[in-house]
Image (cartoon, rainbow, N blue to C red):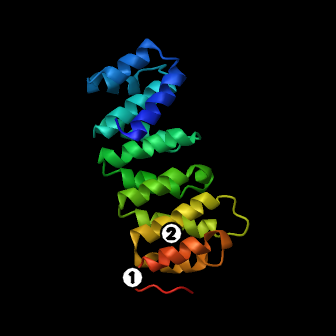
Amino acid sequence: MDEELRSLTERLRRESGGSAEYERLVATEDHGEIAGVLVAPGRPLWARELAAFRLGTAGDRRAFESLVLLLNHRDPPRCASAAHALARLGDPRTGRAAAALATNERRVAYALHPVRLLVELRAPESVPALITTLRRRLRPHDPYRSVALACVEGLGELGDSRAGPVLNEALAHPALAEAAVAALARIPGQRRG
């Protein structure tokens, strides 16, 4: 069992109170039964999350919509689990969905996991979305430094020259300057300043 699955199952076992429904959902290998949880009315959030995670990590695209909703949840552990499953799902819509969430200013407080997912995916949407998100975070007194830092680090990891201008702008922000220097160093042909 990988670490993300172990963390998820421990958290959801507590949420479910160790119910028989939880144990059945963890044990079953029937993807039809698991997918049924996603569309059945009145199912608790922990059950939907467990079902979406199991299907997503198995590459079953029926989990896509539920995972995208969880990626945008206010609870960081749910976002992290959804990002993990979406990265393994292999659905071509994932990059567009993560980019839309990362660049949504109304939900910027929850953009950290979509940003990290974009870096992992290396989708065509990744670099433009990270540039847009970072540029917005460079405003004075922006409270979302963790999102900005994830963008800076991600752009460095992606190594795309389009990120050069915004990374140079990030040099002027003390909380981002060191990461921006490191990111620029990873991009061929980029110079600081």
Q: Amino acid at mark 1?
A: Pro
SS label for mark 1: loop
Residue 23, image quadrant: top left
Say which residue appears at 64% left-offset and 70% top-offset: 138
SS label for mark 2: helix
Along the line of sight, the residue nearer the viewer: 93 or 176: 176
Q: Position of residue 89 (x, y in %)?
A: 31, 44
Spatial separation of the CA atoms under disc 1 and disc 2: 17 Å
Say which residue appears at 32% left-offset and 46% top-offset: 88
Along the line of sight, the residue nearer the viewer: 7 or 65: 7
Mark 1, residue position:
188
Q: Position of residue 43 (x, y in %)?
A: 47, 21
- On-image quarter of the C terminus: bottom right
Residue 27, image quadrant: top left
Mark 2, residue position:
131
Q: Position of residue 64 (x, y in %)?
A: 37, 40
Say which residue appears at 61% left-offset and 70% top-offset: 176
Q: How many marks?
A: 2
